Image (cartoon, rainbow, N blue to C red):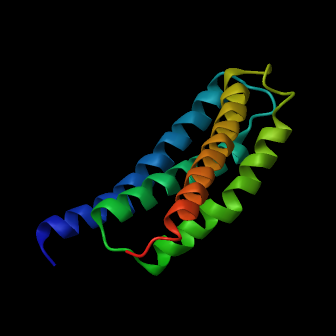
Amino acid sequence: MTATEIITGITIHVVIPLTGLLLFLQLTQQMKKENIQDKPTIELFVIFVTYGGVIIVMLTEICWVWSGMASLGTFYLIFGAPVAMGIITYRHRKTMTLSRYHKWTYISGLAYLIIYVIVLAVFLVTMYFMGDRKV
């Protein structure tokens, strides 16, 4: 394994998750400092994990070697994350007005669902039109 591969692997699998965790902790401290009522801490954690997972899976596909862990992450992003983000969106549809954190929690959940539907539609249309052709 070369030094470049090691640095790439460490960046994808250590630096990016730690950066996300630090940003999440900073956000929770900011909410505490602003004395936000009914803080969406768990929801924000799920959002950070989900979008962080998207980043890690994309970078793994582009820059690294696919693995069983990447497959498990992709499985979560395809089957688990839409359910989690749907619940978050549904729960925060009426609490958006409490704070900017609640509003962005709602928007983040809804954005994932919209992007998910678009990507799924593009994938299915591509598979439909490419399915008949021999490569």
Estimate the x, y position of residue 69 in percent, counting from the top left: 48, 75
Q: Is residue 92 left or right of residue 18?
A: right
Q: Which residue is drawn at 67% across and 31% down?
A: 107
Question: Which image quadrant is residue 80 in?
Answer: bottom right
Estimate the x, y position of residue 1 in percent, counting from the top left: 16, 79
Residue 1 visible in the current orientation: yes
Q: Which residue is drawn at 66% across and 40% down?
A: 114
Compare residues 40 and 35 and report the one nearer the observer. Answer: 40
Question: Which image quadrant is residue 56 in?
Answer: bottom left
Estimate the x, y position of residue 40 in percent, counting from the top left: 74, 38
Report the number of numbered marks: 0
Estimate the x, y position of residue 6 in percent, counting from the top left: 21, 69
Above or below 54: residue 26: above
Compare residues 97 and 85 and report the one nearer the observer. Answer: 85
Above or below 88: residue 107: above
Residue 45 visible in the current orientation: no
Above or below 14: residue 1: below
Above or below 63: residue 16: above
Q: Which residue is drawn at 60% across and 69% down?
A: 75
Q: Which residue is drawn at 77% across and 39% down?
A: 89
> Which image quarter is the C terminus in?
bottom left
Q: In this view, does 38 lie to the left or right of 43?
A: right
